[in-house]
Image (spheres, coloured by chain):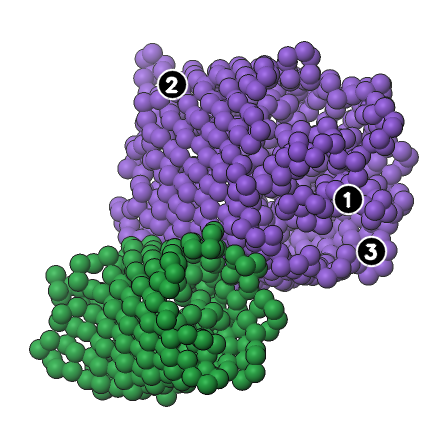
Chain colours: A purple, B green
């Protein structure tokens, strides 16, 4: 048993988990936070008899049904005395157990809490990391002379990140990040140093105070309809991920410049109840339009979400708006039931501009907003029922309800219904949706997961959605659907193959230049085949072939991507790394293909392959000594038929785009 | 209004001229090609070969929840040595326009795992004020029990391309189906089908039946092309069966149907 589940001291486990996740999620997703979380639990595993359901939720690969079955099993049968017991828990398949055992441990029955005790008395430990990356080719934005009146990048083309973590046992932790994106100024005239700073100090389990965070924090409650900052899962091969694992208050550690709060928050537990009050005050990027030049009053015409401050204009919009948020969450949790209410108030120093066009007529146009929501999750036998209802004061309502149920040991079914009104407003809305925001949408999702045996898995879903009001680029109420199916076969630990197909049909405006357009159907289809196999100890290969197709009236674009990965990761070696060689050809932007790339630790990249050419990268890690690591990545894309890459200020003259990335980590 | 209904009807005729395989298979996204039921008579006749008792069933389907447009079906099966015989009737349309299809089937088993069936149909088409026309078609199907819990089925209908006269804009579809069903437990059946209609795109379908308790089952399914969602439930009481299904299509809306069955 011990040998079977022996913990492997390399990073590949987490990388594989993240890859699995990345392959099943949207393109523009922040994986750094989840990588950090998993690395933390890998380094400091939790005793299996002490792990809480909130901690289990942080291990995103467990479904809510599995978490609940685990908690119930432990409650009913008492302490887990052998890890083999996990196999007797309903819905715990071997893969899940293998994954879980990288983040938990079982202390020997007689030792007084073995590792846990060691952790607590441990001196505080520090983790310092520096990252540098730069594009080798000069982009147009850097070549424009200072004397020119046009827009140009004011800073240098280097991207820098400084990251520091401090943990004292499990009770005190601190984090600090400083970042400068490519094109941003460092120690400019204003003397502000890095473009973005983030930091937090958090305390756990001080009497009734379960958690206290000062500085930057994130909040995730219920199904994300009312209050959810940061990471959120959507549709993908992980069909059970439509139920969101909400773990409430957390210290914010990522470098996304938008999706977090700045202030203070605490979680206080009183028996079955917990209350989480929070308050935040911070600046946001926004472009303002002057509405009354006499009194110099302005309105917010749009929020800046990129976090990039490279040009004069981007710098002018930086921190142009202040946001104040205060509120609280009250939650009740007992046995199989969890329910809560969350309410908060947002206030801005400028009013939002009313939508001038018909499609944005219902968008938020006030200076302040109050949000209310109530959510629940209930486990009954083999079913997990969950949902949330939300309301924005003075405007719309939104609802989401779902069920995940194991109807037989091999078959799980997921159903989710949603109805988000066109005038529902929330700045922190990450609920399940087809569109990028959970607003102006009705839909029904059904998913199926079949595991006939330990080697075969079939995941499929179908989602029907309707947008009752018009949207940007869609001049009428519209509808569509998405279907997905994936079969995975892994006969042994050394070999895995999967195939997937996806088809999406939606309405969009036609190409005619009219005031109001008619709608046309747009069909996107893709198919993928991927093979992973270990050839010898320490060396694995991965091949992928993917085709994509885009159809809209007379347009019928095809694209393909084929790549070969070599993954080198021997046990107890100081050096590990991976190499990719990819060939691609697409007939344009619409048939582009996304693929996840390996990157330096805590970084992630998802490459959009379009036009035709070759991409190569190699990514490596070298352990200088225990606690001191170095990473290096070099990537090069060569486009066959282009003499200019990109557009606007990002344009590169030539057919090559290459990047270097260094990272250094020191743990002490 | 009648004209409009007629128009909608004509547009969707290619699909609608197919047999309606009853609410159980419909709620499972019409994935009955590898399943066994009296309603196999309307989707893959090989599915009746193992019937040990005589049975009959009737069904009524409202198309797009319209007031007039409907499908009515009646079926009868009778077990014979190493197989079963079946008779089927189906009427589709409204007062001014309708089709009637009458079929006879012979299905038999070849060993414990394999069964096959042949089916012949007589089609009549009536349009008020234009007269009527008739045609013949045939169908054949097989089912094979691959392992204890996996059954595959294949079916072809109208391979001879039998049709109404040249001047009539109504076709009897040439259809091929290949399906597999998986019995996950005594409570759960999952079925998938690939369907190809001649001169049409391929369709992929998936359906599921879940027997919550021994007298009550819920069913659901999805088809890819065109995209439709299906749902329904079934009740058993002694020798009686009651099945209900609804089909939902993004644009046209819901089509409900109901069937009653009796096993002697």
Q: Nearer the viewer, mark 3 or mark 1?
A: 1
Q: Which label number is shown at residue A10?
A: none
The relative height of residue A104 versus residue A581 in the rendered view (above or below) is above
Instruction: Using the image, name the chain to which the residue with label 2 belongs.
Output: A
Q: Nearer the viewer, mark 2 or mark 1?
A: 1
Q: Which residue is mark 1?
A: A84
Q: Percent x, y for residue A122? A: 85, 20
Residue plotted at (49% across, 15% down): A326
Report if residue A631 is visible in the image: no
Instruction: Using the image, name the chain to which the residue with label 1 belongs.
Output: A
The relative height of residue A645 versus residue A250 in the rendered view (above or below) is below
Q: Which residue is mark 3?
A: A539
Crowd band around label 2 with a 10 angstrom C-alpha radius: few (<14), some (14–19), many (20+): some
Label 2 or label 1, whichever comes before in sequence order: 1
Report the Cα–Cα distance between label 2 and label 1. 57 Å
Q: Nearer the viewer, residue A317 or A645?
A: A317
Residue plotted at (57% across, 35% down): A245
Q: Which residue is mark 2?
A: A367
């Amino acid at each position: 048993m011990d040998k079977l589940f022996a913990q492997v001291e390399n990073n590949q486990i987490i990388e594989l988990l993240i890859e699995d996740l990345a392959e099943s999620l949207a393109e523009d997703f922040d994986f750094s936070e989840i990588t950090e979380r998993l690395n933390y639990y890998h380094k400091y595993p939790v005793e299996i008899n002490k792990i809480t359901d909130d901690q289990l939720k942080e291990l995103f690969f467990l479904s809510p049904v599995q978490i609940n079955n685990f908690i119930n099993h432990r409650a009913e049968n008492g302490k887990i005395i052998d890890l083999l017991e996990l196999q007797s828990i309903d819905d715990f398949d071997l893969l899940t157990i293998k994954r879980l055992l990288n983040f938990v441990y079982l202390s020997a029955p007689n030792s007084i809490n073995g590792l846990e005790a060691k952790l607590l008395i441990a001196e505080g430990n520090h983790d310092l990391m520096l990252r540098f990356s730069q594009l080798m080719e000069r982009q147009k934005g850097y070549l424009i002379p200072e004397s020119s009146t046009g827009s140009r990048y004011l800073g240098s083309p280097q991207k820098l990140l400084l990251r520091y973590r401090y943990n004292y046992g499990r009770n005190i932790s601190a984090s600090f990040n400083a970042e400068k994106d490519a094109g941003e100024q460092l120690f400019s005239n204003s003397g502000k140093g890095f473009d973005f700073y983030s930091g937090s100090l958090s305390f756990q389990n001080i009497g009734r105070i379960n958690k206290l965070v000062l500085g930057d924090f994130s909040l995730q409650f219920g199904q994300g309809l009312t209050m959810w900052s940061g990471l959120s899962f959507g549709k993908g091969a992980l069909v059970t991920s439509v139920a969101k694992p909400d773990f409430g208050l957390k210290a914010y550690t990522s470098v996304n410049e938008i999706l977090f709060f700045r202030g203070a928050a605490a979680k206080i537990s009183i028996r079955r109840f917990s209350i989480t009050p929070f308050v935040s005050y911070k600046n946001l990027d926004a472009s303002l339009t002057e509405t009354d030049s006499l009194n110099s009053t302005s309105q917010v015409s749009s929020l800046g979400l990129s976090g990039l401050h490279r040009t004069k204009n981007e710098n002018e919009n930086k921190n142009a708006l202040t946001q104040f948020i205060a509120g609280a969450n009250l939650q009740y949790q007992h046995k199989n039931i969890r329910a809560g209410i969350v309410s908060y108030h947002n206030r801005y120093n400028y009013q939002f501009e009313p939508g001038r066009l018909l499609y944005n007529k219902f968008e938020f146009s006030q200076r302040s907003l109050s949000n209310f929501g109530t959510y629940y999750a209930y486990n009954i036998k083999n079913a997990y029922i969950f949902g949330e209802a939300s309301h924005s004061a003075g405007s719309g309502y939104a609802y989401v309800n779902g069920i995940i149920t194991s109807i037989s040991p091999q078959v799980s079914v997921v159903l989710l219904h949603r109805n988000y009104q066109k005038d529902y407003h929330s700045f922190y809305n990450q609920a399940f949706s087809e569109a990028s925001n959970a607003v102006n949408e009705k839909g029904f999702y059904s998913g199926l997961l079949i595991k006939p045996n330990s080697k075969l898995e079939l995941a499929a879903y179908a989602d029907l959605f309707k947008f009752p009001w018009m949207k940007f680029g869609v001049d009428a109420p519209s509808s569509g659907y998405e279907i997905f199916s994936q079969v995975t076969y892994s006969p042994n630990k050394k070999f895995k193959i999967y195939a997937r197909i996806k088809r999406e049909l939606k309405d969009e405006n036609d190409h005619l230049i009219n005031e109001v357009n008619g709608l046309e159907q747009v069909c996107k289809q893709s198919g993928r085949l991927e093979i992973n196999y270990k050839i010898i100890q320490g060396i694995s290969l991965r091949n992928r072939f993917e085709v994509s197709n885009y159809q809209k009236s007379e347009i019928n674009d095809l694209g393909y991507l084929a790549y070969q990965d070599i993954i080198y990761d021997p046990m107890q070696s100081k050096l590990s790394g991976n190499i990719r060689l990819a060939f691609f050809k697409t007939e344009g932007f619409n048939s582009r293909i996304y693929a996840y790339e390996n990157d330096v630790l805590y970084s992630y990249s998802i490459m959009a392959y379009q036009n035709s050419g070759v991409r190569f990268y190699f990514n490596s890690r070298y352990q200088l000594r225990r606690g001191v690591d170095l990473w290096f990545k070099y990537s090069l894309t060569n486009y066959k038929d282009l003499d200019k890459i990109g557009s606007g200020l990002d344009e590169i003259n030539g057919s090559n785009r290459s990047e270097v990335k260094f990272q250094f980590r020191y743990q002490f | 209004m009648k004209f409009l209904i007629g128009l909608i009807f004509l547009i969707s005729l290619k699909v609608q001229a197919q047999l309606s395989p009853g609410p159980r298979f419909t709620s499972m996204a019409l994935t009955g090609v590898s399943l066994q039921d009296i309603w196999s008579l309307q989707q893959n006749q090989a599915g009746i070969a193992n019937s040990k008792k005589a049975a009959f069933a009737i069904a009524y389907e409202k198309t797009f929840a319209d007031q007039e447009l409907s499908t009515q079906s009646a079926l009868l099966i009778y077990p014979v040595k190493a197989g079963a015989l079946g008779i089927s009737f189906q009427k589709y349309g409204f007062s001014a326009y309708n089709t009637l299809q009458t079929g006879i089937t012979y299905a038999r088993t070849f060993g414990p795992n394999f069964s096959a069936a042949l089916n012949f149909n007589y089609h009549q088409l009536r349009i008020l004020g234009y007269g009527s026309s008739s045609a013949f078609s045939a169908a054949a199907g097989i089912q094979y029990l691959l392992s204890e819990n996996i059954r595959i089925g294949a079916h072809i209908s109208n391979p001879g391309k039998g049709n109404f006269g040249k001047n009539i804009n109504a076709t009897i579809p040439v259809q091929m189906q290949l399906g597999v069903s998986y019995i996950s437990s005594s409570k759960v059946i999952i079925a998938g089908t690939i369907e190809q209609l001649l001169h049409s795109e391929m369709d992929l379908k998936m359906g599921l039946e879940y027997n919550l308790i021994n007298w009550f089952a819920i069913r659901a399914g999805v088809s890819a092309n065109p995209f439709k969602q299906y749902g329904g439930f079934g009740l058993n009481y002694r020798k009686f069966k009651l099945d209900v299904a609804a089909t939902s299509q993004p644009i046209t809306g819901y089509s409900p149907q109901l069937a009653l069955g009796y096993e002697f």
